[in-house]
Amino acid sequence: MSSLEPDPVALSEALIARPSVTPEDAGALDVLIEFLTPLGFECHDLTFDDPAGEPTRNLYAVLGDSGPNFCWAGHTDVVPPGDLGDWTSDPFVPTQRDGRLYGRGACDMKCAVAGMMAASAKFVAESGTDFGGRISFLITGDEEGDATNGTKKVLEWLTERGEKLDACVVGEPTNPAHLSDMVKIGRRGSMNVWLTVDGVQGHSAYPHLADNPIHRLLGLLTSLTDVPLDEGSDHFQPSTLQVTTVDVANKATNVIPARAEARINIRFNDLHSSDSVEALLRGRLDQAGGGYEMRTRVSGESFLTPPGHLSQVASDAVKAVTGKAPELSTTGGTSDARFIKDYCPVVEFGLTNETAHKIDENSRIDDIRALGDIYLHMLNGFFERAK
C-alpha cells in the first residue's frame, strides 16, 4: 500500500514539495504513481520529445476495463517562483499558517490534483472497483510551458491505443473569490498578432523626405480598435482585441524611424474561428489602406461544452458541498481543455485563482478539503447518472 494517506492536504504538501518548474518533473508524477498504483490504477509513465520543445514527462493512469471513462486532467508543472527573498516561506516547502497552505502550485494546481487523488481513493473504498466504468488521470508537466509535449501528445497516444475518454474534468483554478463561484464550460480562443509597417527613415525637420511608419501604424490600429469584434453570444462575453505593445526601437528624438511594429492579443468567442478572425482583421486593415505585414499565432480555438450531463454533475457536486450553485462560465484564459474538447465533453473546476502565479501563492485549507469532497460527489454523480 502507498504510504500516502487519501487526505487532500497531505497529498498537496507532497506535490508542492517537488520543485517541478516547467519542464522539470522533480518527482511530482512519482507521487501520483506511488499513490494510484496500490488502488489498482494502471500507470503509464510517458515522456515525449521533439525538436521544437523540451522533453516532457506525463502520466496516464486508468482504473477499470470497461464502461464510461471519467478522466481527471491537470498538470503538476508550475511557473518559476521568482525572487525567493520575496517569499515569506520557501515556495517548495509547503507551509501552513493562518488557515492557508502556502507554496508554489498551491493554487495552480497541485492542490486540485491532490483533491482528485483523494476523491478517487475514497470513491474506490466506498464503491469497490466494480462501479460500472473507468476512472483515469491525464496529468502533464507541460501546461505552463509551450504545451507541445504534454496533454496534446498524450491524447494522440490514447487515440493510437484505441482508448476513449467519455468525460473530463480539468482542475484549473476557476473561481474568482469563492469555491462555489464558477464551473467553466468553455474557453475563448486566443490569437497573437504581429503587425509591421515599413517606412522611410529621415530627419524629423524634413518629413517630406521621409515616410513615417508610426503615423500609418496608428491609423491601422485605430481601424482595428474603433469597432468591437462582436457583441457576445449566448454563452460568451464579447470578443476582445488589445494592443499590447507598439515599438519603433528609436532612441533619437529627431529621427523618423524606418519601421514600426505592434503586437495584439485577441480573445475570441464561439462566433469566430481563428481563420475568420484573421480574415476580419485583414479586411479592416485593407480598408484602412497603407502597406503592412501581419502574422498570427493561435494558441487555442474557442470551444463550448453545452450545458448537459457533465456540467449538471459538476454543478450538483458544488452545490452539495457548498450549498450554492455555480455559474456556468466561459471567461478567463486558455487551458489544456482546448485540446481535450476534441475528444470528449470537458468542464473545468478547481480552487480560487486569486494567488495563481503570485509570490506567496496559497489556498485556504478548508477549500482544499472541500474541493476533494466536491470531486468525490462528481464521481458519484457521474457514475450514478451513467447507469
Image (cartoon, rainbow, N blue to C red):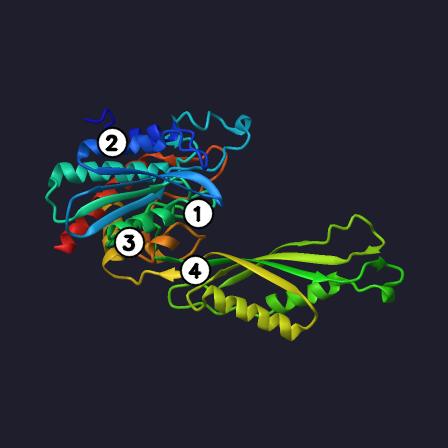
Please indicate whether residue 222 sits to the left or right of residue 337 in the image. Answer: right
Q: Residue furthest right?
A: 205
Mark 1 or mark 4: whose residue is earlier in sequence = 1
Say which quadrant the C terminus sits in: bottom left
Image location of residue 198, percent across then percent down: 73, 62
Residue occupied by mark 4: 301
State the residue in front, 354 or 136.
136
Mark 2 or mark 4: whose residue is earlier in sequence = 2
Residue occupied by mark 2: 35
Mark 1 touching mark 4, by CB under 8 A? no
Nearest-to-viewer mark from 1 and 2: 1
Residue 294, above or below 183: below
Distance between mark 1 and mark 3 Cα atoms: 36 Å
Nearest-to-viewer mark from 1 and 3: 1
Distance between mark 2 and mark 3 Cα atoms: 32 Å
Name the residue: 41% across, 50% down.
335
Mark 2 touching mark 4, by CB under 8 A? no
Residue 298, above or below 116: below
Whether residue 198 is visible here, answered yes or no, is: yes
Disc 2 crowd rating (10 Å Cα; few below 14, some 14-19, many 20+) is: many
Distance between mark 2 and mark 4 Cα atoms: 35 Å
Say which quadrant the N terminus sits in: top left
Mark 1 or mark 2: whose residue is earlier in sequence = 2
Which kind of residue does numbered mark 3 sit on?
Ala
Residue occupied by mark 1: 148
Distance between mark 1 and mark 4 Cα atoms: 16 Å
Which kind of residue does numbered mark 4 sit on?
Glu
Residue occupied by mark 3: 325
State the residue in front, 89 or 33.
33
Distance between mark 1 and mark 2 Cα atoms: 27 Å
